[in-house]
Image (cartoon, rainbow, N blue to C red):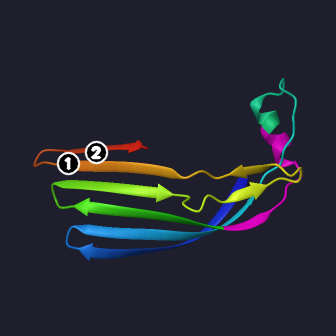
Amino acid sequence: MTTHNVALTGVQLLSEHMSVGSTIRYVYGSYGVDSGAPALPTNAWLDHAAGLEQNGQHKADLDVGIKVGGQTVQVGFVARNLLQPTLTGLDGSSIRIDRRFRAGGSLSTRWSVHRGETSI
């Protein structure tokens, strides 16, 4: 599967400590299907995959995020691929780009900054 994206992002400050952003994306994607030869090394597989006949398609997608916090504590949440575009191969099979969610936060003290994030 190969995708190319062109995106337009906007951010809106809702209050002194809260902002939301969204990105609408034009996605040009394609994928090819082949049973391949399991004995091929990785580089040979990638070269083989690049030569597969593919069915290019035009899709749209949307990402949204929110950040809340001040100087000491910040928390954020991002949802990607909300429209879950589906690409169809030449053989009629399809593959969906699944939604992804991430959350993160940071704590800043006078001496250090602690950060963490996770996929949900």
Q: Position of residue 57 (x, y in %)?
A: 77, 64
Where is mark 1, residue-wise? Answer: 107
How many badges with numbers are in the image?
Answer: 2
Residue at 31% x, 69% y is 19
Residue lying furthest top: 39
Q: Which amino acid, by three-letter code, is at mark 1?
A: Leu
Residue 38 magenta-highlighted = no
Looking at this view, is 117 or 60 the one in front?
60
Q: Position of residue 113 (x, y in %)?
A: 21, 46
Residue 115's disc number: 2
State which quarter of the image contains the C terminus.
top left
Q: Which residues are magenta?
A: 46-59
Q: Residues within 10 Å of mark 1 (few under 14, many from 20)?
A: some
Report if the CB atoms under discs 1 and 2 are less than 8 Å apart. Answer: yes
> What is the secondary structure assignment of the residue under circle 1?
strand
Q: Residues within 10 Å of mark 2 (few under 14, many from 20)?
A: few
Residue at 78% x, 51% y is 31
Q: Which amino acid, by three-letter code, is at mark 2?
A: Arg
Q: Position of residue 117 (x, y in %)?
A: 36, 44
Left/right placement of residue 20 relative to residue 14 reads right
> What is the secondary structure assignment of the residue under circle 2?
strand
Give how far apart the Cα atoms at labels 1 and 2 are.
7 Å
Above or below, 78 against 44 in this view is below
Quadrant of the image occupied by residue 68: bottom left
Residue at 84% x, 59% y is 55
